[in-house]
Amino acid sequence: MNPRRHEPPPPEIHRLLLEAAAPHAHQIRRSDPEAALDTVARAPLGACFHNSVRPDPVTGETARRRYADELGDMAIAYLLTPDRRRTTRT
C-alpha cells in the first residue's frame, strides 16, 4: 500500500516538476525513485522560499538564473547518485 495515497495532491509547481522528471525516471539511481523525485520537487521550492526570507536574497535576472541552474545541477546529481550505504553506527 502506498502511504502517500491518502495525502492531498501536491501544489501545482510540485506536480509540474514531477511530471517533467517522469520521462527520465529510469535514470534515477536512488533506491526509491518515487521518493527521490518527491525530494527533488520539494527542495527547489524550499530553497526559493528560503531565498525570499533571507536578508540578502538572490536578486536580478542573471543571479536568479544562476541560482536556478545550481539548484538544478544539485537535483540531477542527487538523482544520479546511488544511496549511501548505511552502517550500524549511523
Image (tube, rainbow, N blue to C red):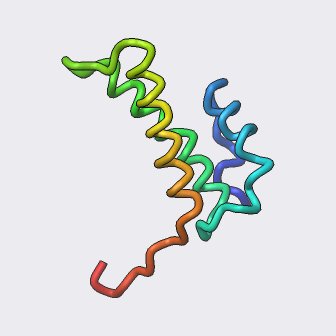
All told, the count of numbered labels is 0
Q: Is residue 16 left or right of residue 65?
A: right
Give the residue at x 69% y 40%. 18
Q: Position of residue 84 (x, y in %)?
A: 44, 74
* Quadrant of the rendering where the C terminus is positioned: bottom left
Tell me if 51 is positioned left or right of 21 in this view. Answer: left
**Furthest-top residue in this view:** 60
Quarter location, residue 70? top left
Q: Residue at (40%, 80%) from the top-left corner?
A: 86
Q: Split into 4 quadrants, where in the image is the N terminus?
A: bottom right
Residue at 66% from the left image edge and 24% from the top image edge? 12
Q: Which residue sits at x=19%, y=18%?
A: 55
Residue 62 occupies quadrant: top left
Give the image location of residue 37, x and y in percent.
62, 50
Q: Position of residue 88 (x, y in %)?
A: 33, 87
Taking 23 as reference, is 28 above or below it?
below
Direction from residue 12 to residue 89 in the image, left or right:
left
Farthest front residue in view: 62
* Above/below status of 3 relative to 81: above
Residue that protrudes farthest toward the left in the picture = 55
- Give the x, y percent position of residue 60: 38, 12
Looking at the image, which residue sits at the far bottom? 88
Residue 8 lies in quadrant:
top right
